Amino acid sequence: MKHTRIRPFNSKDTYPEQNLDNDLCQAVVAGGVVYLRGQIGQDLETCESVGTGNVEAQAAKAMENIKMLLQEAGGDLECIVKVVVYLTDIRYREPVYRVMGSYLKGVFPASTGIVVDALARPEWLVEIDVTAVLAQS
């Protein structure tokens, strides 16, 4: 079975300041399941950070990226079954979950929240990782 890979990229282009050379993608569709790369406050077209210093703006951009990637995979936000949220500060929990909740009203995914020391870039304050299952045709 061949998997569908959405928005492939190489990490040397996305992280030019780091000595990396990994072939990755933003999403993989395998057996009707969509596995998204953790989304952050970054524009997927330009790789520019969005909302520097503003966790709510970063969470909103991450959710917009998730929405767009799920649409590209043939689904939508209602397909989400699991969310993992990574925060760099526990104080960000309420504002991030409020933003995320506005996108996921009525979806009821399983959810895990984790506080970490840092993400891949110092300006990133939140990362949202999603797994979704496409509707059966």
Image: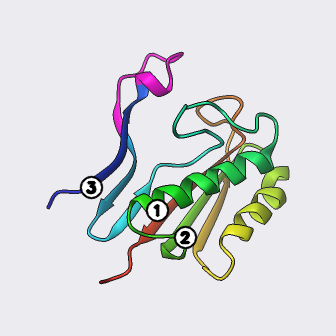
Q: Where residue 40 sits: x, y (%)?
A: 62, 44
The answer to which of marks 3 and 2 sits earlier in the sequence is 3
Q: Is residue 15 left or right of residue 41?
A: left
- Check disc 2 and report its element: helix, strand or loop: helix
Q: Residues within 10 Å of mark 2 (few under 14, many from 20)?
A: many
Regarding mark 3 in the picture, which secondary structure is present there?
A: strand
Q: Residue at x 62, y 64 (%)?
A: 112
Separation of marks 3 and 2 at Cα, in angstroms: 19 Å
Mark nearer the N terminus (2 vs 1): 1
In the image, residue 31 lies in the stretch drawn in magenta: no
Badge 1, how many Cα within 10 Å: few under 14, some, many 20+? Answer: many
In the image, 61 versus 112, the foreground residue is 61
Q: Which residues are magenta?
A: 12-24
Q: Is residue 20 magenta?
A: yes
Query: Residue 70's mark?
Result: 1
**Quadrant of the rendered structure where residue 41 is?**
top right
Q: Position of residue 66 (x, y in %)?
A: 55, 57
Q: Cβ–Cβ below 8 Å for labels 2 and 1? A: yes
Q: Which disc number belongs to residue 77?
A: 2
What residue type is disc 1 on? Leu
Q: Which mark is residue 4?
A: 3
Name the residue at 53% across, 76% down. 78
CB atoms at circles 3 and 2 under 8 Å apart? no
Looking at the image, residue 114 lies above or below residue 81: above
Magenta stretch: dominant secondary structure: loop
Q: Which quarter of the image is occupied by the C terminus?
A: bottom left
Position of residue 114 in the picture relative to residue 95 (left or right): left
Which numbered disc flags the more N-terminal residue, 3 or 1? 3
Which residue appears at 68% of the width and 68% of the height? 103
